[in-house]
Image (cartoon, grey):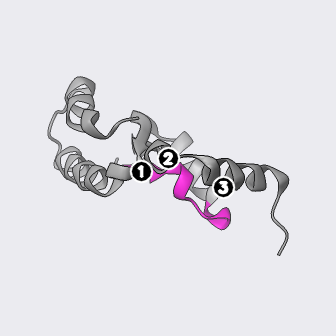
Amino acid sequence: MKISPIREMHVEAEENLPLDAAKTMFEIYREAQPPFTARVVYYTELQEFQHQREIERAFSADSIFSGFLWDRTKTEAKKEIAALLDCLNDEEDISDEEIGARLHPYLA
């Protein structure tokens, strides 16, 4: 299986990063169509076959928050993001500032 040059550069760049410098790009968004579900996409974790569908889904939605997570704290960050999604989907009003404050310890 041949790897695209761009993907090859990405893999090579990741391999050369110190462990504590690796990060994951993510976006929390709300779907633009009913039932307006809040979701998250971790862009740097997408497999090749998922890229098009997931990116189209996120780009057609309303962005709530995006950024980069340090990989060293990603497991804890994903738990916090899941809790935020539960709140958002329960129609709790959460400001961008509160989301940022809750994710601050994990943001790169």
Question: Which of the two marks, 2 or 3, is nearer to us in this view?
Answer: 2
Measured as percent of width and height from the top left, residue 37 is found at 33, 51
Category of crowding for the residue at label 3, using alpha-carbon neighbours closer than 10 angstroms: few (below 14), some (14–19), many (at least 20): few
- Amino acid on which disc 1 is placed: Asp
> In the displayed structure, does residue 27 sit left or right of residue 81?
right
Marks 2 and 1, Cα distance to the nearest angstrom? 6 Å
Magenta stretch contains residue 25: no
Compared to residue 47, the image places residue 20 above or below, namely above
> In the displayed structure, does residue 58 sit left or right of residue 88?
right
Q: Are marks 3 and 1 in contact (CB under 8 Å)?
A: no
Magenta stretch contains residue 49: yes
Badge 3 marks a residue whose secondary structure is: helix
Measured as percent of width and height from the top left, residue 3 is found at 81, 64
Q: Are marks 2 and 1 in contact (CB under 8 Å)?
A: yes
Q: Which residue is mark 2?
A: 22
Q: Considering depth in this image, is 2 or 50 the residue closer to the camera? A: 2
Marks 3 and 1, Cα distance to the nearest angstrom? 24 Å
* Magenta residues, start to end: 38-50
Residue 12: which disc?
none
Q: Considering depth in this image, is 103 or 39 the residue closer to the camera? A: 103
Badge 1 marks a residue whose secondary structure is: helix
Residue 71: which disc?
1
Q: Which image quarter is the N terminus in? A: bottom right
- Amino acid on which disc 2 is placed: Ala
Q: Considering depth in this image, is 9 or 40 the residue closer to the camera? A: 9
> In the displayed structure, does residue 21 sit left or right of residue 89?
right
Residue 52: which disc?
3
> In the displayed structure, does residue 88 sit left or right of residue 12?
left
Measured as percent of width and height from the top left, residue 73 is found at 32, 50
Category of crowding for the residue at label 1, using alpha-carbon neighbours closer than 10 angstroms: few (below 14), some (14–19), many (at least 20): some
Q: Residue at x 16, y 49 (%)?
A: 90
